[in-house]
Image: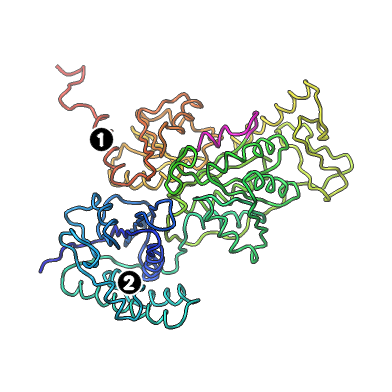
């Protein structure tokens, strides 16, 4: 019998089922085992806002080379119930393969039947059907079973030994069933593992943000839990004791942001992690940070709004909120990582920037990036220096001394003889309340002068492709890696991309970079093209096309490739039209 499907280099595996059926456990066990076996992994989740029920799915991209974006296609589908099969059916192609238990699935043509429930019962634990499924999938890629067995021992370490042994037996049964499919020629897999991958880091975007904060010297985090940003809080709490971090789950978001301001005032490096609805409540504290010139780092995990919106989906709809929230005029910095590496690096750098310029720094991520799981080489985990931006105060210390660059020397209470006086009202150089209107102008100007130095220090955009390409695709945040892979698929010499890891203040070279290309395309996960609008306001360059998506899902590589190809075809001159010099 010829193979049903021959996979090579890159497999898109999708697992679906209702919440509470153990999809997350399947993902954790399988991805860990595959990574330890030497495969590159990129896994993303799609889940509904409920604890049980609904229909959730996870896509695990298994590859012989590094991968960092989600796909729209389904190569292997493992539906754990009928509802998942029906919901995911539109993503199937003629060459897709469905693995499942015929006892729970119906109407699936060419279903490869695997008796998950029966094999689990034979192992002594009916609930181990998902473990059987993991064993089958691992057996299909042709590597050893040891990584899975080790992962099971760790995953169920707190359970009774009989449960662990049953799951180990279930894994072996599933693994044998998977190997039999390969041996019978029903599936042909051509993935090549790389031994070095086993030693890679393996982390989610939330972990990358949290570890970056730790490396940046974060020693205080306050938050009111709100998805998708809660993951970073949980990671910091897990490492609080070993890393010397004070963790406070506040009664609400206002309290959380005010606690962080107090911590910075006292000399700590504090983080607040939240999502859009929580950030709304923090805007008064943001304005307070602007007036008192107190550093503040906020991690804003975006999700669709307004109001509760789609709380477990993804979007890039909060850029303008982050840029304009808080009453009054004062400077701030907005960072937007486009990968796990950048999530680590920018979260780390946010603390240095906040401390240096005494402004709020907002790190914008989204559900897609935070929940995505991937392997990557080792990161620089050495903490950055946390001294150098504060001074030991003298008896004549003036907290808001007028400075040419707008950055007054920042003292810490108890470190020196001076009084560190701050006030939310307009104030003089000593920090005392003042209604001197001429002084008001000088203080506003002083605060805004920081923008000059902040722009000079802005992180440069990253160009991928020829610097004088005819068409330039601009990205920010999590669309970066999806666009990058789409451009590689298009393989057009006259096409390049420009990714902005810092979206405010814009780097000073932005205008020149946008003026070069003949055609400008901006890709965003929102409905109004918020970054395209920001670029136009600051540079005068209008995007020729805005590729927008706002249904709660990220772009896929395939749909973006198709859209860009269509635009490129429109930009190309018609070969039937002659130039003016032709007769």
Give how far apart the Cα atoms at labels 1 and 2 are.
45 Å
| Residue at image location 25% in from the left, 53% down from the top | 86
- Membership of 325 in magenta stretch: yes
Vertical side of 146 occupied by 12: above or below: above
Q: Residue at x 19, y 66 (%)?
A: 112
Towards the viewer: 59 or 83:
83
Q: Quadrant of the N terminus?
A: bottom left
Which stretch is magenta?
318-331
Residue 172 colored magenta? no
Local SS, label 2: helix
Residue occupied by mark 1: 566
**Can residue 196 be spotted in the picture?**
no
- Where residue 149 sits, quadrant-wise, is bottom left
Q: Which mark is residue 129?
A: 2
The residue at the point 82 percent across, 50 percent down is 415
**Residue at the limit of the structure toward the front, as seen here:** 53
Nearest to viewer (mark 1 / mark 2): 2
Q: Is residue 314 left or right of residue 100?
A: right
Q: Is residue 5 left or right of residue 279?
A: left
428 left or right of 223 in image: right
Towards the viewer: 205 or 337: 205
Q: Is residue 285 above or below residue 110?
A: above
Mark 2 burial class by Cα count in 10 Å: few <14, some 14-19, many 20+ = many
Nearest to N terminus: mark 1 or mark 2: 2
How far across and how far down the image is residue 29, in percent? 40, 69
- Residue 387's spot in the image, x, y percent? 72, 52
Q: Is residue 217 above or below residue 493?
A: below
Q: Nearer the viewer, residue 575 or 454?
A: 454
Measured as percent of width and height from the top left, residue 253 is found at 62, 45
């Amino acid at each position: 019998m010829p193979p049903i499907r021959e996979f090579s280099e890159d497999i898109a595996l999708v697992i679906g089922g209702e919440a509470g059926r153990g999809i997350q456990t399947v993902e954790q066990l399988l991805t860990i085992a595959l990574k330890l076996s030497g495969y590159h992994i990129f896994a993303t989740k799609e889940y509904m806002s409920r604890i049980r029920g609904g229909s959730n799915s996870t896509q695990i991209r298994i590859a012989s080379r590094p991968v960092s974006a989600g796909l729209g296609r389904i190569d292997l589908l493992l539906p754990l119930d009928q509802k998942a099969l029906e919901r995911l059916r539109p993503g199937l192609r003629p060459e897709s393969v469905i693995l499942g238990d015929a006892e729970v699935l119906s109407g699936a043509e060419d279903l490869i039947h695997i008796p998950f429930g029966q094999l689990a019962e034979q192992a002594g634990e009916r609930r181990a059907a998902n473990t059987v499924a993991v064993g089958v999938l691992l057996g299909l890629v042709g590597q050893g079973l040891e990584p899975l067995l080790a992962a099971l021992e760790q995953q169920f370490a707190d359970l009774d030994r009989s449960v662990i042994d049953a799951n180990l037996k279930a894994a072996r049964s599933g693994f044998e069933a998977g190997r039999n499919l390969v041996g019978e020629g029903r599936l042909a897999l051509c993935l090549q593992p790389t031994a070095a991958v086993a030693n890679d880091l393996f982390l989610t975007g939330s972990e990358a943000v949290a570890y970056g904060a730790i490396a940046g010297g974060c020693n205080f985090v306050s938050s009111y839990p709100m998805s998708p940003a809660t993951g970073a809080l949980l990671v910091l709490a897990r490492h609080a004791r070993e890393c010397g971090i004070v963790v406070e789950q506040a009664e609400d978001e206002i309290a959380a942001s005010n606690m962080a301001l107090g911590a910075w005032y006292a000399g700590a490096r504090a983080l607040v992690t939240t999502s859009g609805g929580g950030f709304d409540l923090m805007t008064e504290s943001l304005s307070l940070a602007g007036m008192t010139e107190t550093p503040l780092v906020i991690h804003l995990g975006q999700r669709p709004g307004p109001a509760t919106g789609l709380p477990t989906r993804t979007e890039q709809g909060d850029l303008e909120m982050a840029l304009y929230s808080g009453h009054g005029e004062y400077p701030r910095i907005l960072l937007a990582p486009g990968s796990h590496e950048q999530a680590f690096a920018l979260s780390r750098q946010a603390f240095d920037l906040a401390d240096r310029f005494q402004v709020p720094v907002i790190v914008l991520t989204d559900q897609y990036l935070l929940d995505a799981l991937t392997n990557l080489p080792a990161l620089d985990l050495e903490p950055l220096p946390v001294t150098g931006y504060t001074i030991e105060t003298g008896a004549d210390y003036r907290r808001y001394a007028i400075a040419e660059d707008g950055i007054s020397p920042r003292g810490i209470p108890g470190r020196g003889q001076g009084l560190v006086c701050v006030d939310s009202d307009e104030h003089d150089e000593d920090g005392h309340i003042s209604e001197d209107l001429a002084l008001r102008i000088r203080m506003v100007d002083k605060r805004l002068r920081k923008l000059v130095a902040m722009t000079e220090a802005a992180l440069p955009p990253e160009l991928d492709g020829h610097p004088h390409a005819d068409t330039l695709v601009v990205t920010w945040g999590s669309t970066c890696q999806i666009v990058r892979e789409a451009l590689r698929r298009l393989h057009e010499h006259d096409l390049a991309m420009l990714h902005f890891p810092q979206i405010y203040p814009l780097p000073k070279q932005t205008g020149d970079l946008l003026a070069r290309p003949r055609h400008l395309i901006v890709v965003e996960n929102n409905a109004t093209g918020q970054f395209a609008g920001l670029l136009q306001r600051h540079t005068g360059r209008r995007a020729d096309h805005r590729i927008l998506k706002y249904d709660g899902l990220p772009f896929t590589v395939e749909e973006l490739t198709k859209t860009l190809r269509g635009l490129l075809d429109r930009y190309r001159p018609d070969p039937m039209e002659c130039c003016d010099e032709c007769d």
